[in-house]
Image: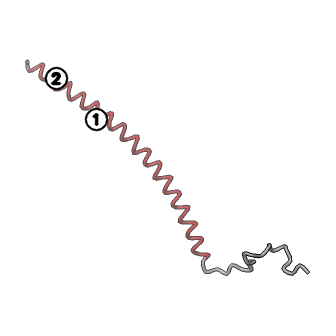
């Protein structure tokens, strides 16, 4: 095998390797983009949940006011039917 043939073979192998690497990089780039989209959505959901938990935490010590007992028929039904 001549030096020129060896060099052409090496170049071909390097080009194939570079092609596989480009393909792999493209696939990984798409995966990273999808993961970033998911993370952004999860971050937004987490912020909403944190806000709701904070609101509930602020309301823990509040007086609930005049709440009818669970067994009552409702606020517009008289307690004494007679």
Does residue 72 appear to the left or right of 57 in the view shown? right
- In depth, the one of 75 and 29 nearer the eye is 75
> Total of numbered circles in the picture?
2
61 up-or-down from 48: above or below: below
Residue annotated with mark 1: 21
The part of the image, by quadrant, that contains residue 32 is top left
- In depth, the one of 7 and 59 nearer the eye is 59
Most distant residue in the right direction = 82
61 up-or-down from 29: above or below: below
Q: Which residue is drawn at 20% across and 27% down?
A: 13
Q: Distance between the residues labelled 1 and 2?
A: 18 Å
Q: Where is residue 9 in the image (x, y as percent from the top left)?
A: 16, 23
44 up-or-down from 29: above or below: below
Residue annotated with mark 2: 9
Q: Which mark is residue 39?
A: none
Q: Which residue is drawn at 49% across and 57% down?
A: 43
Q: Residue at x 44, y 49 (%)?
A: 36
26 up-or-down from 12: above or below: below
Does residue 77 appear to the left or right of 32 in the view shown? right
Q: Where is residue 40 in the image (x, y as percent from the top left)?
A: 48, 52
Q: Is mark 1 on a helix, strand or loop?
A: helix
The part of the image, by quadrant, that contains residue 7 is top left
The part of the image, by quadrant, that contains residue 25 is top left
Q: What element carries label 2?
A: helix
Q: How is the image coloured?
A: secondary structure
């Amino acid at each position: 095998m001549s030096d020129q043939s060896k060099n052409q073979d090496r170049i071909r192998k390097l080009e194939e390797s570079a092609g596989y690497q480009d393909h792999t990089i493209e696939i990984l780039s798409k995966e990273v983009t999808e993961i970033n989209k998911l993370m952004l959505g999860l971050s937004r959901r987490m912020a909403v949940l944190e806000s709701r938990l904070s609101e509930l935490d602020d309301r823990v010590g509040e007086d609930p006011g005049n709440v009818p007992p669970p067994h009552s028929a409702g606020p517009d039904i008289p307690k004494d039917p007679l």
